[in-house]
Amino acid sequence: MAAVALRSLDDADLDVLFDLMRDPVSVRMAAFTAKDPNDREAFDAHMAKVRSTPDVTMRAITRDDRLVGSIASFIIDGETELTYWIDRSVWGQGVASRALAQFLQTLEIRPICARAASDNIGSLKVLQKAGFEAIGTEVSYASGRDAEIEETILRLV
């Protein structure tokens, strides 16, 4: 089985993450993405803000020492939320599940919320496998689809 690990995010990781986060199939599946995934200036500004915010914990996800995504927690409206992005080339191989399990071991805060497009079955399964339970749905505008879609809200207590 391939080794999945988390590590600190380096400046050198940004080029790879930018490419991963603008893959059209991934953008459509994630749905709730940057307004323009191809806007490198906006990506760099966002990453600079995220990486300098004290209440954000962000880690690079590697598989056999190759960067294949990122995972982060952040505070929004007083609640801790979780987000992750996985390289499409490793979807369905347990990378997200293993990375999420490792990340959750480092976070002592509970509850943690997460959101996924309601038709993103893979991501919902990863979150539920980690113990997240659906607590509701919401219809919101999703830039990755240029439409309002339903997203499922989940919580880990």
Image (spheres, rainbow, N blue to C red):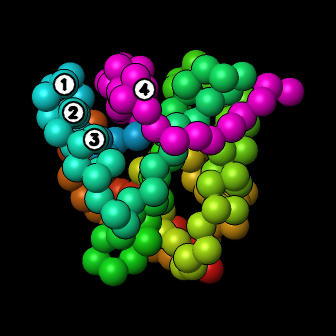
Q: Amino acid at mark 3?
A: Met
Q: Which mark is residue 152?
A: none
Whole-percent x, y for residue 78 in the image: 33, 80
Whole-percent x, y for residue 82 in the image: 47, 59
Front residue of this view, candidates 19 and 137: 19
Cβ atoms at labels 3 and 2 below 8 Å apart: yes
Question: Given this view, does label 2 or label 1 mark the residue nearer the observer?
Answer: 2
Residue under pointer 4? 13
* Above or below for 96 versus 54: above
What residue do we see at 58% from left, 40% from top? 7
- Of the two numbered discs 3 and 1 on the same chain, state the one appearing first in sequence: 1
Q: Secondary structure at mark 2?
A: helix
Residue under pointer 3? 47
Left of 136 or right of it: where is 148? left
| Magenta region | 1-29
* Above or below for 98 versus 63: below
